Image: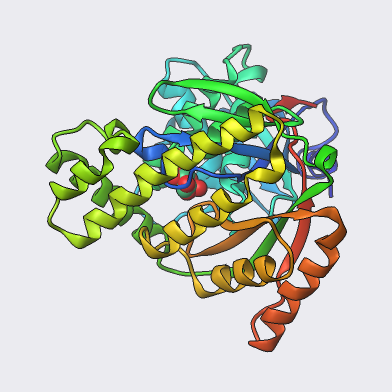
Amino acid sequence: MSAGDLFRSAFGSGAFSEFSAPGRVNLIGEHTDYNNGLVLPFAIDARTHVALSRNDLGEVRVVSAQRPEQIRSLRVGEIQPSEGDVDWTDYVYGVFWALTQSGRTLGGVDLAVDSNVPVGAGLSSSAALECAVGLALSTVHGYDVPLPEIARLAQRAENVYVGMPCGLMDQMASATCQAGSVLFFDVGADTCENIPFDTAASGLSVLVIDTKAHHELADGEYAKRRASCEQAAAQLGLKSLRDIEFDGLADALSRLDDDVLIRRVRHIVTENERVRTVVGYLRQGAVSSIGPDLTASHVSLRDDFEVSAEELDIAVDAALSSGALGARMTGGGFGGSVIALVPESVAAAVTDAVLAAFAARSLTTPVVRTVAPATGARAD
Ligand code: GLA
């Protein structure tokens, strides 16, 4: 059911406005965002749609097409962070809260959500929901909030209201990406640049392999990785690991004595450098040259940052051995998705090889999609 149809069936036939925001894949630059580093995501054409209108009930009522039987409601004054299990509505109420915290005055709203961004696939279904809701709520209350600020408010909602200490990449991608481009976001410098990413012009495709694996440890391990990076930066007397130049890596590592911290730092510094290399290739239109850096990123995430999972490694290996130019896990890790850069002529063979590798191990059948850079949050 579309968000508009759901709105009508849940809240009646009044007028409503519609907004949407996409999921994303990250081409390269993983776990670098919360280290003030470099990332290169793009929006995908899976989107979360929101239909909404203001009400005069003083309540925020929400319903999702993925759970149409439930209308949830909170009074405006009750929307505050609290302890307890995370519920999908926390992403909606969290953004409402973050907007009010930013000094905007919001009132009662009826809001219906529909999404085709897969949940738990590492494709940022949360950021898509947050950004769509952020743009929707601000607009219907008469606020023209710039999209990068929507991204920051969405991140604040997730950090404080949901309690997940994520960086800013996913929200910035969902809010601001442009069709046909990857977003080169330098978190430390707070600059964004859209770089054309036209795989088809080079006879290539990007496959996203949703491995369907979700490992329970994801959130706790994510927070641990972030803490280790902060600890290493503090030991080195730096504000963030971003401050280590690639040339200074050996020196920085020689000043750490903990093997785990050494490997975490090595991942972050080499990953930032790989982002720079990939950006250099893309600026020359040399898309087919980026494969080895994608694969090197995966190896570093697997061995040094230790956020891969067996299913991700199997998908990467199967893709590479059947003709992919490069492949890597994308997103936070511990399950979720792999991206593979493939010549169009071997896309079917790579897909078959991945499915066969999973079948041979009796693993859940992955879902393989082709993606191309789509547009960020917008009014529909
Ligand atoms: C998750 C987080 C992002 C980022 C990635 C890893 O998607 O939400 O902020 O840290 O993991 O690159």
Q: Nearer the viewer, residue 16 or 314?
A: 314
Rendered location of residue 10, percent (x, y): 76, 44
Is 336 on the left-hand or right-hand side of 136? Answer: left
Q: Position of residue 117 (x, y in %)?
A: 70, 50
Give the residue drawn at x 24%, y 51%.
228
Q: How is the image coloured?
A: rainbow
On screen, residue 119 above or below 350 = above
Task: Examine the rendered structure and indicate whether residue 176 appears above or below residue 93.
Answer: above
| Image-quadrant location for residue 161 | top left
Q: Residue at x 28, y 31 (%)?
A: 243
338 or 214: nearer the viewer: 338
Q: Nearer the viewer, residue 17 or 12?
A: 17
Q: Is residue 330 visible?
A: yes
Counting from the top left corner in percent of width and height, residue 150 is at 54, 24
Side of 240 relative to 258 (left or right): right
The residue located at (27%, 42%) in the rendering is 249
Please report the residue visible at 84 percent of the width from the left and 50 percent of the height from the top: 1
